[in-house]
Amino acid sequence: MNLTQQLINGLVLGHAYALIAIGWTVLLGVARLVNFGHGQMYMLGAFMTWFSVSRLGLPYLAAIPVAMMAGVAVGYIMQRVMLRLTLAQDLVSIMIVTLGFGYVLHGAAGLIFGSTGQILETPLSTRDIYWGDLWFTWQDIAIVLVAMAFFAILKYVIDNTGIGRTARMVAEDPPLALLAGIDVKKVYFAVFAFEGAAVALAGALVAPRTPILTSMGFDEVIITFVVVVLGGIGSVTGSYVAGIALGLFTAFFGALVSPAYATAAAFGVLISVLVLRPGGLAAAPGGR
Amino acid sequence: MSAILETHDLVVAYGGNQALAVPHLAVARGELVGVVGANGAGKSTLVNSLLGWSRGRPRITGKVILEGQDISLLPSFARVRKGLLLIPEGKLIFGTMSVAENLASASIGAVPDGRKAYSVEEIYDLFPRLKERRGHLGSQLSGGERQMLGIARALRLGPSALLLDEPSIGLAPRLVATVLQTVRQLADDGLAVLLVEQNVSAAIEVVDRLVLLERGSVIAEGPAATMRDDPRIAEAYLGAHAA
């Protein structure tokens, strides 16, 4: 086993995980909501990118914003449908509705894009880099760089800008945010739209590494769940660290033990961490 | 004096239970009106309902008029932008933000003529203690400092009318006087202020008029000097004994 190759695989996978999860991190952190249709939104982002490149003839770089806009639209519609549940913070109903929404997206994608798996080849995914006996693609580098830039910008915006302060006010106390003149409903819409755009971006970048299928998304929502909880709910830095940690764990576990049990092992880690640090890796030991 | 804030036939109910019924209440520019009453009299319900705001889910009917404009159908955040500011009881600032961030985040941009949005420097002049503590998190402040910051946040938003819910609660007597004198000063500067207070003896020293609530209804109302001698106030809240 080449340890350095596994390290590279783990870092690429980790940044992909972090990128897939970031929308849910913000959704949970600001609006205290979950979205079990998140994985299917990832699938939709991947298919929209493929469709834009293969059927519309758009360059890959132009296809990414198209996929993100589709993600924004889906996020907005989703929030529109369940606004009443959102305002009531009815988490059980929201879980069921978003899960159902995921299945609707799955069915709609099958209807529109067909059930055949597709390959999305991009100018980056087809260009290999060999460095000694190490191998990776430009697509891998793009995933790492975009994820790093995305997290850095998001962290800056949340900590240092008016938009970020508004998001933090709503996250801390929505009724008190109303008293500061903040339209909390609009913030909820914005957060869902952001989640849609972010997960579509992840789909556009990560999906070219594997065949694109309408059945994908279920693994991704599980990975997202692990990353978000491990990172400490709502913590942007925590999600980034947790994503990379999970990526490295998956790569090394796959190489040393078996890829078949990597997800089960990841949940073993999640359970252990939650027992020892209930707030996730970003929280102080013993709780939030 | 023309009323800045006025309400007509305000009724609040939780489920099928009526919690408040106020036929009419008005606060003029530069006037400080105190609302007093026992626990459960409906004082907080009154100020919260003027803003259509509650952590519960009451049914609110009636008219709320701010500077001649009916704002009854506006959501809470829009009423705030119109200049009706509430400093609630309990949690009134953002604990995860510093004092400076709490002040920076309290801004809705330019306010219309006739309303004054205090700058951060003006806030620090009014509350020098907040300047000293500007780097501290809201959760690290004392009760008095939180109250100052709550008022400061409202002033940053350019109020035309200010609603305060029990600002003296949990404060040392010296701080109660300081906070209430600041509220008096704000009214003298031209704000319409409705002050809900359980500390009647302190409130009556600064208010222009007093409204006595009991079981959700106004049972007495008048100038502070007159109300001081009202037996319902004197006996129940000022410690006087009937002859």
Image: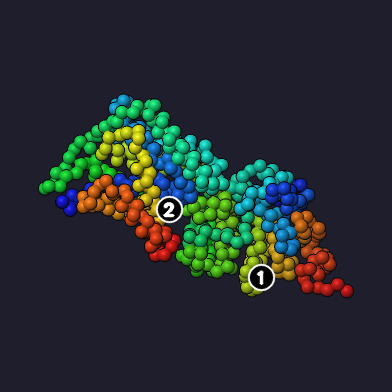
- Tag 2 near tag 1, CB within 8 Å: no
Distance of label 2 from label 1 (alpha carbons): 41 Å
Q: Which mark is residue B177?
A: 1
Percent position (x, y) of residue B82? 62, 47
**Residue furthest to the left:** A132
Tag 2: residue type? Answer: Gly
Would you name the residue on which mark 2 appears?
A234
Percent position (x, y) of residue A228? 39, 51
| Secondary element at image label 2 | loop
**Residue shown at 53% from the left, 54% from the top:** A173
Q: Nearer the viewer, residue B210 or A253?
A: A253
Quarter of the image where one finds residue B40: bottom right
**Residue shown at 84% from the left, 67% from the top:** B231
Tag 1: residue type? Answer: Ala
Check the image and report above or below for B116 versus A201. below
Q: Nearer the viewer, residue B199 or B178?
A: B199
